[in-house]
Structure formats: C-alpha cells, structure tokens
Amino acid sequence: MTDIVKKLAEEVPEISGLRIAAEADGQSLSVSPADHAEQDDQMIEQDGAIIYVDGPASELLADKILDGGVDEVGNIHFALGQQA
C-alpha cells in the first residue's frame, strides 16, 4: 500500500494519502485520493504513506488484510484477504 500512496503523491502533489470508506450498502469499500482526514477517520501512517479509514470501513476491515501494489506498467490494484 505504501507504494500506491507514494506513487499517487508523486503524480498529484496535493494528495497526501488514500481514503478508504464504506459505501452506502455497508458491504463495499471505496478507495480514493485524499489530502486530509474526514471527521472520525482513523489515520494510519507507514513508511511515509498515509491512509485515512472511516469508521464503518474500519469495522469491515477489522479481521482483514488489505494489500495493494503497482504493476510494471503503473496500474494500481488492491486485494482483500482474511487475517491468518
């Protein structure tokens, strides 16, 4: 995930991180560039990369592992799995 945030920050300097939020259906997540936390967001910082997570998304992700990366042509992808 840190690679994704750093890549976005390089391409769009006004973005400081990513924001993960729960969609209205309560089961889906959205990931979007962000320059600040919204009220009640948790902020996670790792190796200089910042991710903001809203409360409902935090509950959905509590027992999950969120991974992501940038492939060889620069495409961003995410994967969600169960914690071991």
Image: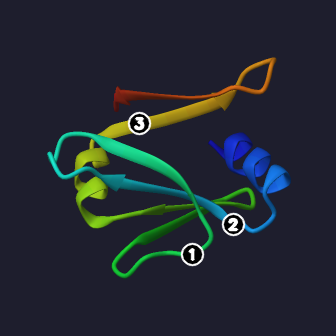
Q: CA distance from mark 3 to mark 2?
A: 22 Å
Task: Identify the residue position indicated by label 3 in the image.
Answer: 65
Mark 1 or mark 3, which is nearer the start of the sequence?
Answer: 1
Which of the two marks, 3 or 2, is nearer to us in this view? 2
Mark 1 nearby-residue class (10 Å; few <14, some 14–19, many ≥20):
some
- The percent position of residue 24, horizontal first and vertical second, equals 18, 52
Task: Identify the residue position indicated by label 2 in the image.
Answer: 16
Q: CA distance from mark 3 to mark 1?
A: 23 Å
For badge 3, the amino acid type reads Ile
Task: Identify the residue position indicated by label 1 in the image.
Answer: 36
- The percent position of residue 41, horizontal first and vertical second, equals 39, 72
Do the residues under discs 2 and 1 have CB atoms within 8 angstroms?
Answer: yes
**Element on which disc 3 rests:** strand
Give the answer, above or below, for where 27 lies relative to 81.
Answer: below
In the image, taking residue 39 as reference, residue 56 lies left or right, namely left
Residue drawn 77% across the image and 50% down it: 6
For badge 1, the amino acid type reads His
Q: CA distance from mark 2 to mark 1?
A: 7 Å
For badge 2, the amino acid type reads Ser
